[in-house]
Image: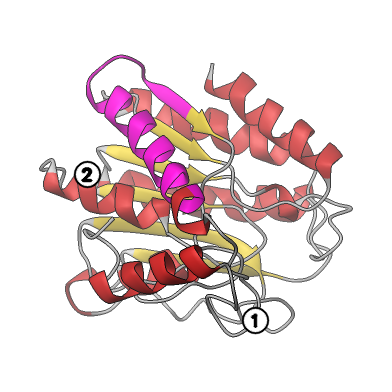
Amino acid sequence: MRSFHSAQYLEFVRERSASGAGHLDGGDTPAFKGVYEAAAVVVGATLTAMDAIMAGKCRRAFVPIAGLHHAARDRAAGFCVFNDCGVAIEQLKRAGLKHIAYVDIDAHHGDGVFYAFEDDAAVVFADLHEDGRYLYPGTGAASETGRGAAQGMKLNVPLPPGADDATFASVWPLVTAHLEKFAPEFIILQCGADSLEGDPITHLRFSPKVHGRAARELAALADALGHGRVLALGGGGYNRANLAQAWTAVVENLM
């Protein structure tokens, strides 16, 4: 976890985990006894899946309780304690991969991943999300395309409230074209189900077919690139029926 998070932040979470008091951020992410261990297990699950793919034991993996994309290197945010996506990316870089793709279809912008790697040319980033003017965390403008050596390697596609499957179909080719340009050696899909119609805290109107298509086409792209590596992480979602349908569609299409 220290490959992504600061030692000071890890110690802060450990202390709050022991006391079970207070919050880990400004109010969204409460502390509770054992929160450090619980959040660390999420990271461990993601790394176990990543290792299995890298070792050739499987081509794809899905971890439902993962994809905690808001946590920053030095702080918690948006219900996310440790950023398992970021830890996985750091470990893949250490394994020698030159281009790692992170694709996010959660309704919320994956700010914890984006800003941690905004100037990192090893990370190809693509994020479809509800426009930050209407939804937390308020980031992810189309003008945010990376900095320095990574300028142009980050794709942010903010969507208006009410965006549906037709809207997705009109912008998804931007994502696949973006990835094809950089030929990533590993693809991470954060497939948050809070972008489905009926989620109580967001305003997008996707059906589960969107999540199925994203998984299917990313798997096909990975196969075409010769490695087949896709790691799907559940992300957000606050309607249980939507969770079941979206993630079942992801697993079905990864297979």
Residue ID at (26%, 71%): 6
**Residue 187 pos. (x, y %):** 37, 40
Q: Which residue is mark 1?
A: 27
Callout 2, which amino acid? Answer: Leu
Image quadrant of residue 4? bottom left
Q: Which mark is residue 219?
A: none
Describe the element under mark 1 as helix, strand or loop: loop
Q: Nearer the viewer, residue 53 or 65?
A: 65
Distance Cα–Cα, label 2 vs label 1: 32 Å
Q: Are marks 2 and 1 in contact (CB under 8 Å)?
A: no
Magenta segment: 38-61
**Residue 123 pos. (x, y %):** 28, 57
Q: Nearer the viewer, residue 207 or 106?
A: 106
For this view, does 246 lie left or right of residue 79? right
Image quadrant of residue 54? top left
Provide the major secondary structure of the magenta segment.
Answer: helix
Q: Does residue 239 show up magenta in the picture?
A: no
- Indicate whether 183 appears above or below 72: above
For this view, does 248 lie left or right of residue 26? right
Q: Which residue is mark 2?
A: 92
Q: Nearer the viewer, residue 164 or 198?
A: 198
**Residue 29 pos. (x, y %):** 61, 71
**Residue 197 pos. (x, y %):** 85, 52
For this view, does 68 lie left or right of residue 49? right
Image quadrant of residue 208? top right
